[in-house]
Amino acid sequence: MMTEESTTQTPIMITESAIEQLENIRQSQNIPDDYGLRVGVKGGGCSGFSYELGFDSKKPGDEVFTVHGIEVYMKKAHGIYLMNMVIDWEEGLNNRGFSFKNPNASSTCGCGTSFSA
């Protein structure tokens, strides 16, 4: 008997520069090959919600997407907050790190990692 893993249209986009940094992190921190990228939201931060981004094992109930060859795990309930979000890597004088461009956020705070919906 075969079981199929459900994969649907990815709700998020990840830029090439962010993919490059994620691959560097995976290699430099010896992240296990069977871990994927967990993207989500959690309560907290200056605006009500903050983003979760990190490598993790697949959990029951996760939706699974593939973005530029990276397996992405997301709880289905988080999709409403993250639909069409773009994860980017910025490297500038004032800012260095992952940025989240979220069209669902009604407001964001100055740090860019907290939002309200």
Image (tube, grey):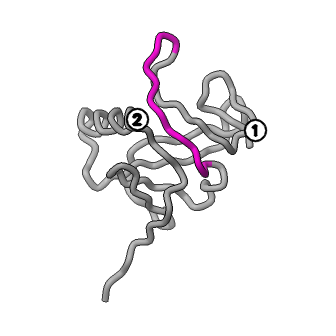
Report which quarter residue 55 is drawn in: top left
Tell me the CA gap for discs 1 and 2.
24 Å
Residue 21, percent across and down? 35, 32
Which quarter of the image is occupied by the N terminus? bottom left
- Determine whether, in the image, residue 57 is placed left or right of residue 43: left
Give me the residue at 55% from left, 48% from top.
40
Q: Residue at x 62, y 40 (%)?
A: 102
Residue that sits furthest to the bottom in the current view: 1
Mark closest to the chain's N terminus, 1 or 2: 2
Query: Relative to the observer, which residue lies in front, 73 or 94?
Result: 94
Residue 24 is situated, as x and y percent measured from the top left of the image, at 28, 33
**Which residue bears the numbered disc 2?**
18
Q: Secondary structure at mark 2?
A: helix
Residue 92 vs residue 117, the one in the foreground: 92
Residue kind at label 2, given as amino acid type: Ala
What is the total number of numbered labels drawn onto the structure image? 2
